[in-house]
Amino acid sequence: NAGVTQTPKFQVLKTGQSMTLQCAQDMNHNSMYWYRQDPGMGLRLIYYSASEGTTDKGEVPNGYNVSRLNKREFSLRLESAAPSQTSVYFCASYGLAGVRELFFGEGSRLTVL
Amino acid sequence: KNEVEQSPQNLTAQEGEFITINCSYSVGISALHWLQQHPGGGIVSLFMLSSGKKKHGRLIATINIQEKHSSLHITASHPRDSAVYICAVSRTDKLIFGTGTRLQVFP
């Protein structure tokens, strides 16, 4: 089935630990995004990638790194997790050519203790 | 001022009521999206609009490009429509989100 696959769905980390959130889409979309969603804050853009090999900072990039491994995959890495990074993370992909399709992953709930 | 503003922020309704959620934006866009997020759930795209009006079941979305305004209407609302509705605009490859409208429909 076409869509965006995000892993893991849940993760608990201790302060200072590192982890990578994985995202893959099978719709041949060029643009992919990582957002975080905090209560009452709406979706805030962390990083995005307009095409394979390019990445750009969004609204809240500090403490995160990303990698656009290929057209399908866009990963988000927390090098040294902090409690302020406790959030729900969403990956999205967007197709510009032809039909403009916007799809989201199911979300990854991260808790940093 | 946010580039995408939604109103109202919160909305309660009785089952069967007609509901309207509004979205205004201040930038040039290539498309506007309406998204739905159920409590604790994922985000689903309901509509993508670049002009005019679209209808899907009890949901209707309209956009007025000149006035930079879009509305999402729900006819004959039902408790299962309770969710957060998010407006997002796209400018080439950038997406800008509103903060959402929380809708609760009571039986």
Image (spheres, grey):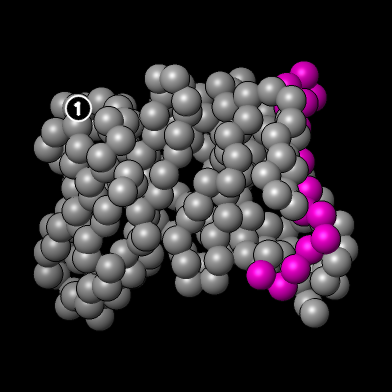
In what element is the residue under mark 1? loop
Residue A57: in sight, yes or no?
A: no
Q: Nearer the viewer, residue A8 or A16?
A: A8
* Quadrant position of residue A54: top left
Tell me, yes or no, if residue B68 can be seen here.
Answer: yes
Q: Residue B100 at what x, y percent from top left?
A: 63, 54
- At x 52%, y 37%, the residue is B96
The answer to whether B19 appears left or right of A61 in the picture is: right
Q: Residues within 10 Å of mark 1 (few under 14, many from 20)?
A: some
Residue A73, picture quadrant: top left
Quadrant containing the N terminus of chain B is top right
Residue bounds of the magenta highlight: B64-80
Residue B44 at x, y percent in the picture: 50, 52
Q: Residue at x 63, y 24 (%)?
A: B50
Q: Who is closer to the viewer here, A47 or B73?
A: B73
Q: Is residue A32 left or right of residue B60?
A: left
Viewer-proximal residue among A113 and A34: A34
Q: Is residue A24 above or below residue A49?
A: below
The residue depicted at 74 percent of the width and 43 percent of the height is B60
Q: Which residue is mark 1?
A: A52
Numbered disc 1: what chain?
Answer: A
In the rendered image, the vertical position of residue B56 relative to residue B11, given as above or below: above
Which amino acid type is shown beneath numbered disc 1? Glu
Identify which residue is drawn at 19% across, 75% down.
Answer: A13
Q: Position of residue B13 (x, y in %)?
A: 83, 69
User: Where's the C terminus of chain B, which quadrant?
Assistant: bottom right
Image coordinates of residue A111 in percent, x first then y, are: 29, 75
- Rendered image quadrant of residue A107: bottom left
Magenta stretch: residue B34 in it?
A: no
Picture layout, residue A33 above or below residue B51: below
